Amino acid sequence: DTAVSQTPKYLVTQMGNDKSIKCEQNLGHDTMYWYKQDSKKFLKIMFSYNNKELIINETVPNRFSPKSPDKAHLNLHINSLELGDSAVYFCASSLSAGGITDTQYFGPGTRLTVL
Amino acid sequence: AQSVAQPEDQVNVAEGNPLTVKCTYSVSGNPYLFWYVQYPNRGLQFLLKYITGDNLVKGSYGFEAEFNKSQTSFHLKKPSALVSDSALYFCAVSPGGATNKLIFGTGTLLAVQP
């Protein structure tokens, strides 16, 4: 059983389109994250949700809107896609928001290509 | 500001030789340090973490890391490298506070030659 899963694995789209990436975890964790990995493999956190509540927003453009319908799911919706949004997006989860020593478990990533 | 540095973009080692992937950190409080590995076209896999206690931390796949407070380092090591260890390795720090986010280093590509 996959602990953290993402769909789709690959996403190719045109500039200006709106797209969504879905993430689900079956670990029973309270906290979920979105990270962006750019073309140079640099990883940076975008958002974090704890039990459906936003707790981290790292100055991400408001074209990016995370949505957490329940604590096992954290989806990422991106409006008006730009070329610079091309990256690999990773979802992750950890046991609790205040657990600064908790291990984060990552999904397989979604490679977004904006043409 | 909390940060980690991985000074080597790439490390080359022959199979069977010991390997070291370097990481130094800068934190204002207690350092909580992690190593992750990323295989090609895959997600990040957790290897090990240092929270407190013994400076030598053992992790998955035979990897270990040595925490050195005076040198602010957390180098990843393995006594005998395998070709299958070839991957991208990330050091990360948890800066603490009310939220749990990871700040990653720039990654080190490990290439193990047969």
Image: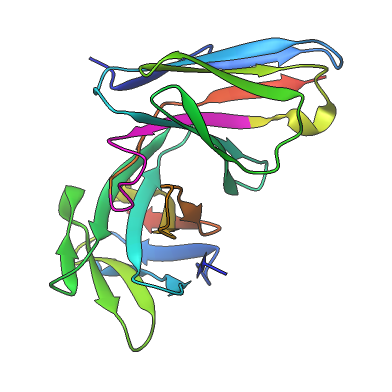
Q: Residue visible at 42% across and 33% down?
A: B43
Give the colour scheme shown.
rainbow
Residue A38 image position (x, y, % from top left): 66, 41
Indicate yes or no whether the magenta region holds residue A99.
Answer: yes
Q: Is residue A12 above or below residue B83?
A: above
Instruction: Tell me residue B111's x, y (percent).
Output: 42, 55
Q: Could you say which quadrant of the image residue B56 lies in?
A: bottom left
Identify whether A57 is placed above or below A26: below
Residue nearest the observer in this picture, A29 or B25: A29
Q: Is residue A112 above or below residue B66?
A: above
Quadrant in which residue A26 is drawn: top left
**Is B47 positioned to the left or the right of A66 in the image?**
left
The residue located at (57%, 29%) in the rendering is A89
The span shown in magenta is: A88-101
On screen, residue A14 versus residue A106, left or right, reads: right
Residue appearing at x 44%, y 60% in the figure:
B95
The reply to whether residue A34 is visible in this rendering is: no
Indicate the quadrant containing the C terminus of chain A: top left, top right, bottom left or bottom right: top right
In the image, residue A45 sits, relative to residue B25, either above or below, namely above
Q: Quadrant of the N terminus of chain A?
A: top left
Q: Position of residue B18 (x, y in %)?
A: 25, 69
Q: Nearer the viewer, residue B44 or A80?
A: A80
In this orientation, does residue B9 appear? Answer: yes
At 80% from the left and 34% from the top, the residue drawn is A84
Please, which residue is most extreme toward the right here? Answer: A16
Q: Per the image, is B112 magenta? A: no
Counting from the top left corner in percent of width and height, residue B90 is at: 44, 54
Q: How many marks?
A: 0
